[in-house]
Image (tube, grey):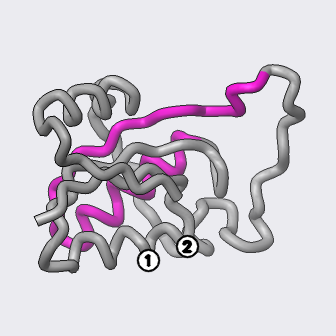
Amino acid sequence: MHKVILDSDPGVDDALALYYLIRHPDIDLLGVTTVFGNAPVSVTTRNAHFLLKAWGHHAPVNPGAAGPLTPDMPPEAYPVHIHGQNGLGGYPVPDEAVDQPDSAAQFLIDQVRANPGQVRILAV
């Protein structure tokens, strides 16, 4: 069994990757860490919660980077022409309140410490 953390910006493409991970019999999905990209991090975090709940999986979701780590990098527009305004191609996603757990960085540290040498981080 492979212990995996998915680090992504859940839009249409990463939704499919997440689905494959939770359905694979040899994957133990420890959690999802989210970043901005296909949409703002608040939206990608909400999308990850929504998808996991819809597919009956209870992995934790921890928000990460809300913007570029390089301060001189210009902000880019989100690819709404591909992923829609909500990152999931306009599919109706309820705007439910979710608990804001530890940051993605702290979650990664905690999981690696709890499972030394066993965690695979799939950053897409």
Q: Where is residue 103 in the image (x, y as percent from the top left)?
A: 38, 26
Res 9 → quadrant: bottom right
Question: Which residue is the site of mark 2?
Answer: 12
Relative to 56, say whether 47 is above or below. Answer: above
Q: Where is residue 3 in the image (x, y as percent from the top left)?
A: 18, 55
Tags 2 and 1 touching, CB below 8 Å: yes
Front one among 25 and 31: 25
Q: Magenta segment range?
A: 41-70
Q: Residue at x 56, y 65 (%)?
A: 11
Q: Which residue is drawn at 32% across and 78% down?
A: 20
Relative to 26, say whether 66 is above or below. Answer: above
Residue 65 among those drawn in magenta: yes
Is 16 left, or right, of 67 in this rendering?
Answer: left
Regarding mark 1 in the picture, which secondary structure is present there? helix
Residue 92 among those drawn in magenta: no
Question: Which residue is the site of mark 1?
Answer: 16
Where is the N terminus found, in terms of image quarters?
Answer: bottom left
Regarding mark 2 in the picture, which secondary structure is present there? helix
Res 81 → quadrant: bottom right
Q: Tell me the CA gap for discs 2 and 1.
A: 7 Å
Q: Position of residue 53 (x, y in %)?
A: 24, 63
Res 86 → quadrant: bottom right
